[in-house]
Amino acid sequence: MIRIAGVVLAGGRSRRMGRDKSLLRLGGDAAPTLLERSVALLRPLCEQVWVSCRSGQVYAGQSCVPDILPASGPICGVHAALVRARMEGIPAVLALSCDMPLMHTDMLRRLVTAFAASPRQSLMTAFMAPNGWTESLAAIYRVEAASFLEAAVAQGHLKMREAVPLELQCFEQYGTEDARAFFNVNTPQDLQQAATALGDAAAQEQGEKFTEIPDRA
């Protein structure tokens, strides 16, 4: 039995979307939010599922884990989840960004399988795209990675894929046929593309109405 906790990364400010993208719905008003969908994807694979939140942010009905480090970004959310997992006696955390509406269970099961087969010294198991890009926001981290994330933030380095030394990373390669699972929505235009992929006319209309605000979320 592989003990893994799950964390949905939802602490961003969604500046480019113009509203909290974790609360967007694809599939009509009765569909789950992107946050709820992400939580549901993790539940069959993880013994506990948390939601990463920035200070003062709360999602009703969810077990929220606030950032600890004095910075912002996904690295802080993953770090807080690792600290929580260590306290709970859980050796690893599957981190998933809330803004991947095309992600599915089969891909995440592949990741868990790759983690189970990874060397014990590997602290990060992540998908790797055909072009070598590391999908650090759909990855599994051992709790020992927390110290590397702390050191990276202290040095002003906030990129997840660079925080853990390369020799301590393990990769699951995916092909172009799987690339859509990693499509993430940051702007109204992205929302429309995701809606088109899912055949969701209502979400396409929402995407047209949202106000886009510059700067990365």
Image (cartoon, helix red, strand yellow):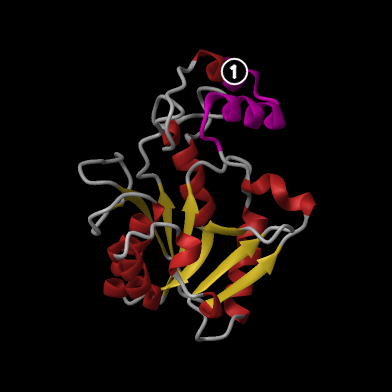
Q: How many marks?
A: 1
Residue found at x 46% / y 74%:
3
* Residue projecting furthest to the bottom: 120
Dividing the picture into quadrants, the one containing residue 126 is bottom right
Considering the whole magenta stretch, tell me its main secondary structure. helix
Which quarter of the rendered picture does the C terminus lie within?
top left
Residue 73 coordinates in the image, percent (x, y): 37, 50
Residue found at x 46% / y 21%:
212
Left or right: residue 142 compared with residue 135: left
Which residue is denoted by mark 1 in the rendering?
202
Residue 95 coordinates in the image, percent (x, y): 46, 59
Amino acid type of the residue tagged 1 in the rendering: Ala
Q: How crowded is mark 1: few (under 14 residues within 10 Å), some or many (20 or more)?
A: some
Q: Please, is residue 153 above or below residue 171 in the view?
A: above
- Magenta range is 185-205
Q: Does the magenta stretch include residue 204?
A: yes
Residue 104 coordinates in the image, percent (x, y): 63, 50
Residue 84 coordinates in the image, percent (x, y): 29, 66
Dividing the picture into quadrants, the one containing residue 83 is bottom left
The one of 23 and 158 positioned closer to us in this rendering = 158
Q: Is residue 85 visible?
A: no
Residue found at x 57% / y 85%:
119
Residue found at x 29% / y 39%:
60
Dividing the picture into quadrants, the one containing residue 197 is top right
Q: Please, is residue 74 above or below residue 58 in the view?
A: below
* Residue projecting furthest to the left: 56
The one of 10 and 4 positioned closer to us in this rendering = 10
Q: What element carries label 1?
A: helix
Q: Is residue 156 magenta?
A: no
